[in-house]
Image (cartoon, rainbow, N blue to C red):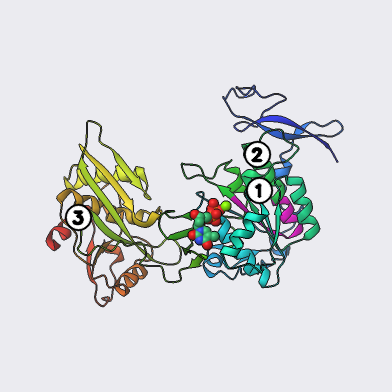
Amino acid sequence: MAKEKTIFTCTECGGASPRWLGKCPACGAWNTLIEALAETGPGTHRYSASRYAGLAQAQGVMPLSAIEASDVQRSPSGIGELDRVLGGGIVEGGVVLIGGDPGIGKSTLLLQALDALQRAGLPTLYVTGEESGAQVALRSRRLGLEHSQVNVLAEIQLEKILAAIDAMQPAVAVIDSIQTMYSEQLTSAPGSVAQVRECAAHLTRAAKASGVAIVLVGHVTKEGALAGPRVLEHMVDTVLYFEGDTHSQFRLVRAIKNRFGAVNEIGVFAMTEKGLRGVSNPSAIFLSQHSEPVPGSCVMVTLEGSRPLLVEIQALVDSGGPSPRRLSVGLDKDRLAMLLAVLHRHAGVACGDQDVFVNAVGGVRISEPAADLAVLLAIHSSLRGRALPRGFLAFGEVGLAGEVRPAPRGQERLREAAKLGFCAAVLPRANAPKKPIEGLSIHPVERVEEALNVVRDLT
Ligand code: TYD
Ligand code: MG
């Protein structure tokens, strides 16, 4: 085996240096050198890119048709909402990265899932680097899992963890969290980019080689991105994110990448005193319960996974100072600026000197452009101080030319809204249903101005 020593490589150009330098000697970029391992065999000295790349088993060249397509082996975790985001269950040899704010419920959910798998007869291992075994036991009592047979290892050194996985050969191993792990081959501290990347790469290789499914828990930074390099997302098969507000009871788990299932699929949970419980019919939990309609609120139906969800969009427009603020929570800030420009230019509604705040209720994040029309109508409603009618909803993408573009699967969205008692919808003309939907009056529009006129007529 080649002897390994550490070098510093540039994240921009891949250039290497034996010492840490502020400036890359190859490309001149600043602060891009990070610690990495070099393999020094006889006559070779190269950056070990292979440790990150060689995840698939090496095979000779052969035509696609000659390769046997093996179906993936899935083990359902027994927690329906988690299986939904995983695409049916945990895949043999698959690596899942699960991210989220501290205290949102990552450890709780995974302990529950491991216990369910263990009870289904699959050996499981929970590696904790953040809590002691006693703390994990305390949590398990709280979850009502005092007789759980899940194996727990309190350890942060990668080599020992790999040895334990190798010796025990569990079906699923959870690493909680990847930022607390360190490899003794690197000198940098746990949680540093180099350590996180190195540990994840080793664990991924171990998963592929042994068929053990590995779940990595990752912390997110204040900006909401997984701390550590983006390379983590490329390395793993599935990336799940916890969403939702730690102050509210509900938690969303969203698949943002999945090699074994659909992306954007959402699992919905409620945090109870006995852990996380799946919410099987979640469509109405992101609506606040106003006894009377209030200005600045518009409901939309979002359909990012396979299930429609009704979400209330709130806006507040208030007179601002010399440099007015535009703030959005759960919605794209750049799109907000774009919508304000469209509102001004095409509908003559100016908010130039006003502060504008928008929020998706319940801590849910909406990235689909179908939210545009609801955001726009909520802003307009707040500006006029007039509430939208009771049972009103809107969805549709808004373009820079002021046009309202269709959203995918409009019928499904409308049916869900009708089921929950909504009675009026403003939507893109292309989404207008051919047959009427009982209880729902449809107002198809092609342009933003038209949508505002419909609302003026209704209120
Ligand atoms: P935790 O799983 O430790 O979060 P993470 O691993 O993502 O940091 O969740 C801890 C929070 O969940 C904590 O605020 C307490 C709450 N909680 C419950 O409400 N009920 C429970 O049964 C458990 C175990 C935790
Ligand atoms: Mg935790």
Q: Secondary structure at mark 2?
A: loop
Please tell me which residue lies in front, 372 or 129: 129
Whether residues under marks 2 and 1 lie with C-beta atoms below 8 angstroms apart, the answer is yes
Residue 205 drawn in magenta? yes
Q: Is residue 394 left or right of residue 408?
A: left
Check disc 2 and report the residue beneath it: 190
Q: Secondary structure at mark 3?
A: loop
User: Residue 300 sits in which quadrant?
Assistant: bottom left
Q: How far is the residue under mark 3 from the one under mark 2?
A: 49 Å
Task: Tell me what residue is drawn at x 66 percent, y 66 percent.
Answer: 72
Task: Tell me what residue is drawn at x 62 percent, y 54 percent.
Answer: 135
Quick check: can you spot residue 89? Answer: yes
Query: From the viewer's perspective, is residue 413 above or below residue 34?
Result: below
- Name which residue type carries label 2: Pro
Residue 142 image position (x, y, % from top left): 56, 63
For the residue carrying disc 2, how many other residues have a C-alpha within 10 Å: few (<14), some (14-19), or many (20+)?
Answer: some
Q: Is residue 55 left or right of residue 380?
A: right
Please tell me which residue lies in front, 251 or 346: 251
Check disc 1 and report the residue beneath it: 129
Mark 2 or mark 1: whose residue is earlier in sequence: 1
Q: Quadrant of the C terminus?
A: bottom left
Q: Name the mark on residue 74.
A: none
Residue 373 image position (x, y, % from top left): 28, 55
Q: How far is the residue under mark 3 from the one under mark 1?
A: 48 Å
Q: Name the mark on residue 295.
A: 3
Q: Secondary structure at mark 1?
A: loop
Q: Quadrant of the N terminus?
A: top right
Whether residues under marks 3 and 2 lie with C-beta atoms below 8 angstroms apart, the answer is no
Specify start and end residues of the magenta stretch as a single range: 204-217
Q: Nearer the viewer, mark 2 or mark 1?
A: 1
